[in-house]
Image (cartoon, helix red, strand yellow):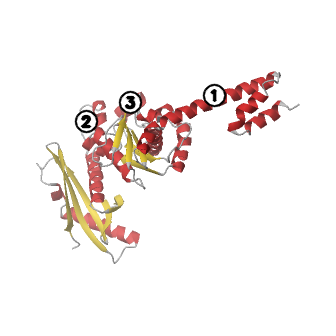
């Protein structure tokens, strides 16, 4: 007679298609240990069948797209609309036809450990995926809804091959030509959207853990930037840091205006983003030496470009570029020479530019001046 251990091993190694037949074979064995073992396998099979049915239902929207002739269907979802700090992140995922990944669901319904496990499986199986990240200063500039759309467009732009149809959680993405369908609670109803929600969540959570090391004391690794009681208490005690959304935390800092350092950092981030759109490759931000600092160092058209960023809320005290006087220019030049020597770039082509950011009438104005000053 087989031992219980031998039966367990046999059932564990049994092909799924034959398991029911093997379980029935042992039903006549009256040993309590065997019956307890069979009960466990029957429950496991019932759970497996239920999961298969759930996954089958989750493919209904994708199958509708395939029936209409679309081949590459992307699910897209975002995470991070509500936090007081950190970026909003969106992910787009194209899965193979009839792909089933056990456990995929709305990321909020999964444990961190399960999300991490599924993250690797999703990326391994995906035909393509993309992740879009919009930082806090951009959220403050254009509002969280528009920032969410921007993150989604970024994620979609990274897909290779590109999607020919999009399933998106709840919203309609403006500014794209690809056909799309918004599904309320889509992360619970579409496998592709559920997969995207997991990728976005894991990506953002990892970012917030890194930010916790850079900006300690706010509990970002635990609260992920959301407004927990401990996080709000830290804001009131310490003030805000560079990744806080000013438009979200202003109620916790009554009467506190933007500091010069915060204003400067916001301006530099805006300038760097605009320069990238203009074709510049950003090499360094806030390069510091003992006697000076350069806000942005970039490359374009064979030039190493040293850019000074000036940010003002209005022009009552003159335009931002007027603050780059002769004394400031000399400081920038000395620091640029130190950078050239440090990086071994002697003999190259260099340029000194100025980026101006001016806010007023609820708008932000950007002006970029190439060759704003030269070596004497």
Q: Which residue is mark 3?
A: 233
Q: Which residue is mark 2?
A: 256
- Residue at the spot x=48%, y=51% of the render? 127
In this rendering, would 305 be left or right of 21? left
Mark positioned earlier in the residue sequence (1 or 2): 1
* x and y, in percent, of residue 77 in the image: 40, 40
**For numbered disc 2, what is the local secondary structure?**
loop
- Residue at the spot x=63%, y=28% of the render? 46
User: Which of the pair 323/67 is nearer the observer?
Assistant: 67
Q: CA distance from mark 2 to mark 3?
A: 16 Å
Screen quadrant of the C terminus: bottom left
**Do residues under tags 2 and 3 come within 8 Å of each other at their CB atoms?**
no
Q: Which residue is mark 1?
A: 46
* x and y, in percent, of residue 142 in the image: 25, 43
Mark positioned earlier in the residue sequence (2 or 3): 3
- Residue at the spot x=40%, y=73% of the render? 344
């Amino acid at each position: 007679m087989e031992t219980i251990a031998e039966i367990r091993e046999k059932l564990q190694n049994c092909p799924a298609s034959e398991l029911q037949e093997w379980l029935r074979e042992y039903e006549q064995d009256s040993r309590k240990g065997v019956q307890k073992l069979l009960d466990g396998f029957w429950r496991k099979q019932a759970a497996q069948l239920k999961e298969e049915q759930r996954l089958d239902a989750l493919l209904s929207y994708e199958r509708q797209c395939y029936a209409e002739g679309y081949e590459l269907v992307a699910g897209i979802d975002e995470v991070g609309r509500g936090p007081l700090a950190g970026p909003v992140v969106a992910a787009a995922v194209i899965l193979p036809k009839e792909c089933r990944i056990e456990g995929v669901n709305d990321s909020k319904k999964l444990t961190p450990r399960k999300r991490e496990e599924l993250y690797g499986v999703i990326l391994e199986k995906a035909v393509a995926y993309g992740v879009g990240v919009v930082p806090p200063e951009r959220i403050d500039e254009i509002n969280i809804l528009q920032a969410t759309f921007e993150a989604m467009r970024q994620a979609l732009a990274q897909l290779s091959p590109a999607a020919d149809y999009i399933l998106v959680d709840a919203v309609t993405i403006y500014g794209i030509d690809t056909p799309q369908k918004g599904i309320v609670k889509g992360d619970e109803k579409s496998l592709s959207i559920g997969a995207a929600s997991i990728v976005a969540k894991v990506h953002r959570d990892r970012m917030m853990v890194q930010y916790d090391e850079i900006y300690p004391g706010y509990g970002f690794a635990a609260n992920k930037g959301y407004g927990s009681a401990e996080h709000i208490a830290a804001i009131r005690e310490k003030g805000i840091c560079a990744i806080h959304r000013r438009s979200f935390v202003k109620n916790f800092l009554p009467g506190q205006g933007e500091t010069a350092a915060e204003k400067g950092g916001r301006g530099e981030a805006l300038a760097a983003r605009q320069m990238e759109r203009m074709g510049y490759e950003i090499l360094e931000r806030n390069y510091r030496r003992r006697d000076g600092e350069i806000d942005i160092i970039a490359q374009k058209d064979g030039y190493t470009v040293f850019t000074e960023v000036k940010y003002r809320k209005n022009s009552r005290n003159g335009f931002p570029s007027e603050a780059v006087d002769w004394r400031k220019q000399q400081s920038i030049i000395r620091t640029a020479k130190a950078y050239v020597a440090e990086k071994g770039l002697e003999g190259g082509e260099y340029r000194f530019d100025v980026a101006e950011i001016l806010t007023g009438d609820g708008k932000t104005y950007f002006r970029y001046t190439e060759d704003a000053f030269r070596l004497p």
